[in-house]
Image (cartoon, rainbow, N blue to C red):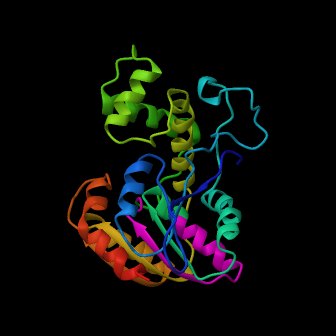
Amino acid sequence: MHGGPALTVLVADGAGEPLFLVLSEQFSDLEREAARGWETGRPVYTLSLEHDPGTNPGASPGVDPGADPAAEPWTATVPELAERFVGELLAVQPAGPYHLAGVGSGAVLAFELARQLRAHAREVGRVVLIKPPALPGSPVDFDLALRRRLALVVKRFGLGGEEDAEQVLALLSREGWYGADTGAADLARLQRVAAGLAWALSRYRPGACDVPVVLLQDEKEADAAELLWGRAAADLRPHWFDYGVEWFGPLLADPRVADVMKAELLT
């Protein structure tokens, strides 16, 4: 798992321990914008896989894996992905307490990151999970996950197959997909990263973690989410939102989310 830096500063000014926000694989700029509006008084750093090469260690760096149908599947487990963040996080903040949050798939990575910090006797103040995906799922292999991902993009944007990468990126960008620095050459790699995350999440079962967990989730998923995260967390504090959609965009834009973040994290 080698690539560009996973950790970047989002809000430099503030007091107290920073907030580390693990982004989803898809709507990173939307999530950054929301986090700037939380105004917790803390510095904010983001952690993401958006610069990950989408290949396993040892894969040839001279090959574009997205263009090679025979490329080795990108298969890293949730603990392995979270472990990638640990070194960069500790370089910024050597001692706890640590305040973590995550959105979508990033919420699951944030929870596992908290577990790994606790396993090394580090203090974790809280973990905020913003609309994590339903777990557990049925294990899916990488090739199937990639086919499903590509089919989703084709259907969602009505692609006919004649579009070039620049045209596809323009369509995705208008819907808020990916960060502003994403180029057309990144698209194939990012689909592999998304498929790899689907592979990892389908195999992940959250273990117990002795930290408070703040859960922001849609009401339609309340029963399953409360059962899953209630078993894993030392103290679960749920907040329910009535949107009834899979996408977390409406929830992120809800001013009540900012209120929760301020109440939990205000210095």
Q: Residue at x 65, y 68 (%)?
A: 92
Taking 36 as reference, is 205 left or right?
Answer: right
Q: How many numbered marks does the figure carry?
A: 0
Q: Quadrant of the C terminus?
A: bottom left
Please determine whether, in this image, residue 150 is positioned above or below residue 89.
above
Give the residue furthest to the top.
Answer: 162
Whole-percent x, y for residue 118 in the image = 64, 80
Give the residue furthest to the right.
Answer: 58
Taking 146 as reference, is 27 left or right?
Answer: left
Whole-percent x, y for residue 205 in the image = 54, 66
Magenta residues, as a range? 110-133
Please determine whether, in this image, residue 168 is positioned above or below residue 110.
above
The part of the image, by quadrant, that contains residue 133 is bottom left
Q: Residue at x 39, y 81 (%)?
A: 264
Please determine whether, in this image, residue 208 is positioned above or below residue 108.
below
Nearer the observer, 203 or 166: 166
Specify whether residue 122 is painted magenta. yes
- Answer whether residue 215 is visible to the viewer in this image: yes
Q: Residue at x 67, y 80 (%)?
A: 95
Q: Residue at x 67, y 65 (%)?
A: 86
Please determine whether, in this image, residue 75 is positioned above or below residue 166.
below
Whole-percent x, y for residue 158 in the image = 30, 25
Taking 168 as reference, is 8 left or right?
Answer: right
Whole-percent x, y for residue 138 in the image = 48, 53
- Answer whether residue 222 is visible to the viewer in this image: no
